Structure formats: structure tokens, C-alpha cells
Image (tube, grey):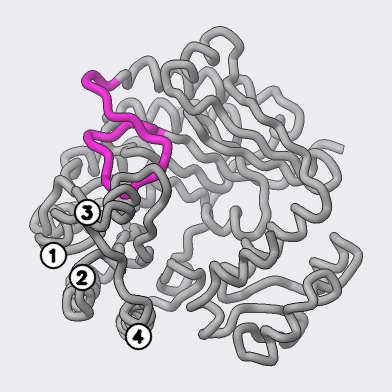
Amino acid sequence: MALVAPFSLYLHIPYCALKCPYCDFNVRVVRALPEREYTSAIVRELGHYADAEGWRGRSLRSLFFGGGTPSLFAPQAIGAMIERAAELFPFTSDIEITLEANPEDRRYFAGYRAAGVNRLSLGAQSFQPHLLSCLGRRHSADDTRAALETIRREFDNFSLDLIYGIPAQTLEDLRGDLAAALDFSPPHVSAYNLTFEERTEFYYRLKRGRIAPAPEELEIAMAATIEEALAGGGLQRYEISNYARPGKESRHNRVYWEGGDYLGIGAGAHSFLAADGAFGRRWREEKNPIRYMERVARDGTASMEYENLDAAKAAAEFMFMGLRTTRGISTNDFARRFGKKPAEIYPQIDAWVEAGLMESDSGRLRLGRRGFMVADEIFLAFV
């Protein structure tokens, strides 16, 4: 029987004007942006999947342009990709179309809205000049404020990214960032704890002793400050790093957390098809943008590294992805899919509930407030 449930589409734009020292995403800094060639490759590969088993005939409920820096591409290029997606996959009436953007690219924002983008995600990161300098960002706090003024004129829905736990950041710095963000009444805020990922500039600086991470007790105090300040501004936490006003949660990201189908197109993008195999199938695209464009031109697709999930891996992902959200997971849904209750496979759950790290009630299992503070350690137990 043909699948009819809507799915989500992720389009990866891998180019940046510079690479931030904390970033471990698949990005490239190039002298000349191959906007036309890369857009053509995206459009061509969309056509390949429109006729592929598992995607044929299905509608689209969200479209997300991520990167890299998608706002380096002009509205005409973004519009061409949206138009082609709409031709191949009927849009649901309430489709969410998000584009990640940097403040310095605000000249394009009105054009993105005209091209069909209805939600912008702005990489502010901080409003403090010394922290923006530490993070290697090109924009200033004034650039961010000007960008937010433009966004509020053009978009009913937008998100704002902040980073905390930055070396030398104080609680007072963080309170200033939160106050500055709330001045613009954002519908959604993502607040990410800085991590030192391998093969990043920050990681090498850390190993050489040139920078130091924020003390754990300060990071805990910062996380509590974020939750309290944003709640006071009308935004409730719904995922480890995400806060929203009612009805403004990211529909696209919920697909990942809830185990839905998503198609990733573009250099290094990942895909997951739940119905392809007993516990789902995933794959990725060629990471190198030049080779990606060459493969699509030759074969129509650059997909590779297909993997059929087994029960153990699928169960682990069900747990640690679902537990990222404040709703947590349905124990009955887990049992229907894997034949056992979560605690029968992961006996440590009972101890976590007893210790207050998890809560279990009304057929749902979720992290408690203390559990969110040590979520990464809990998730490691599943994998």
C-alpha cells in the first residue's frame, strides 16, 4: 500500500563566509559561491526522489533550509527550490518553511518571504560584543537588532538562536542576552550549551590550554536562568534546548524527535524512512559539495551509506530522541513497536525514576528537571 502520511524535507546549503571556531557541521568556505550549480543539483535530486519508492505521491508538511548559511543564497535560488518541491510534493495547508539566516544578510529577508519562506531562524548567538568576537561571528549586536526589526515586519513566525557556556561568559552577560532577545517578543528561542566538538578550532584551543569551558556549576545556573527568564517572557521549554510560545514549536524538528520520515537533500544531508525495513532505513548524501554536484549531474542522486536499523538501535533512538522533549515518550507506543516496556530493556530506568531524574505517569516517561541537566549522560546509557 502506498504511503500517504506527510513527510519533512531538509535542504542543506553547505557554504559559509567563514567557519565559526565551534562549528562541526558540514560547511565549506569558498571564494566564489556556486549558487546556480548547487541550486540546479538540489532541484535535480528532488526530481529523483519524487519518483522513488517511499516518497512517491506523498505530501510535504515542513521544509527546512539549513547549513552552512542558507542566507548566502539569493531569494531567487531559494524560491526555485521551494517551487520545485511544491511541484513534486503537494504542500499541506499549514506547511512550515524555515530558513536559517545570519543577521548580516537582512537585505534578503523580504525576498525570502516573497519566495515562500514563512519562518526565519536567526543566528544571533549573543548580544555581547566580546562574546561575538570569541565565537568568531561577523555580525554585531546592532546588526542583530536591525535584522530582528526587519524580520518582525516580514514574518509572523521566527526563531532566535543563543549560545551559553561561552568561555568568559558571566551570568550577567547571559541575562543581558535574554533581555535583549525578549525585547523583540520572539515566538521561539533556541538556547544551545556550547560544546567542544572534535576537529573544531575550539577543540584544539581547549587541548592546548588556550581556552577553558565554563565551570559545571555555572552552566547549571545558566540553564536555570534561561528557563526562568524565557518562561517569564511567555516561552515554555518543550525540548532540551528549545522554547516556544503556544503553537510556535518547530514542526520540522519535532519530526526528528518523534521518529517521523524526513528526506535530506544536499551535501552531507541525512534521511530516514520509517517504513523502509522493519525498523526503518537511513542514509546520507555525499559530503563534499563538488563531488555532490558531480554525482547528481551523473546519477540524479548522491545518496550513499544505506543502513537498515535493527531493533536495538531503533529502540535506543526512540528513547533518546523522544526523551529530548518535555512530553517524553509513550511507553505503550514503545511496547507496541519493540515488544517490551522500556524498563524491561533498560532496567536503569527504575533507578532514574526513583532518583528523580525521570518521571513516569499516565503511560508516559519523561526526564525530570534534574534529568535535563544530565541528559547527555542518560542518553549514553541507551547507546
| Residue 213, image quadrant | bottom left
- Label disc, if present, on residue 238 of the rendered structure: none
Q: Find disc 4 in the rendering and name its residue.
A: 228
Disc 1 to disc 4, C-alpha distance: 20 Å
Find residue 6 and report its horizontal and vertical position in percent: 66, 46
User: Secondary structure beneath disc 2?
Assistant: loop
Question: Alpha carbon of mark 2 to alpha carbon of mark 1: how far?
Answer: 9 Å
Q: Which contiguous range is marked in magenta?
A: 13-33
Q: Are marks 4 and 2 in contact (CB under 8 Å)?
A: no
Residue 99, above or below 352: above
Number of numbered discs on residues: 4
Identify the residue at image location x=41%, y=51%: 197
Q: CA distance from mark 3 to mark 1?
A: 11 Å
Q: Which mark is residue 169?
A: 2
**Residue 94, image x, y percentages:** 52, 52
Q: Nearer the viewer, mark 2 or mark 1?
A: 2
The amino acid marked with disc number 2 is Gln
Q: Is residue 64 above or below residue 340?
A: above
User: Residue 128 got which mark?
Assistant: 1
| Distance CA(mark 3)–CA(mark 4) | 25 Å
Q: Label 1's element?
A: loop
The answer to whether 323 appears left or right of 119 in the picture is right
What kind of residue is marked 1? Gln
The residue type indicated by label 3 comes to: Leu
- Residue placed under numbered mark 3 in the picture: 135
Please state if 120 lies on the left or on the right of 176 as rendered.
right
Ranked by sequence position, the earlier of labels 3 and 1 is 1
Crowd band around label 1 with a 10 angstrom C-alpha radius: few (<14), some (14–19), many (20+) = some
Q: Which label's residue is closer to the chain start, 1 or 4?
A: 1
* Residue sitting nearer the eye, 305 or 161: 305
Give SS at disc 4.
helix
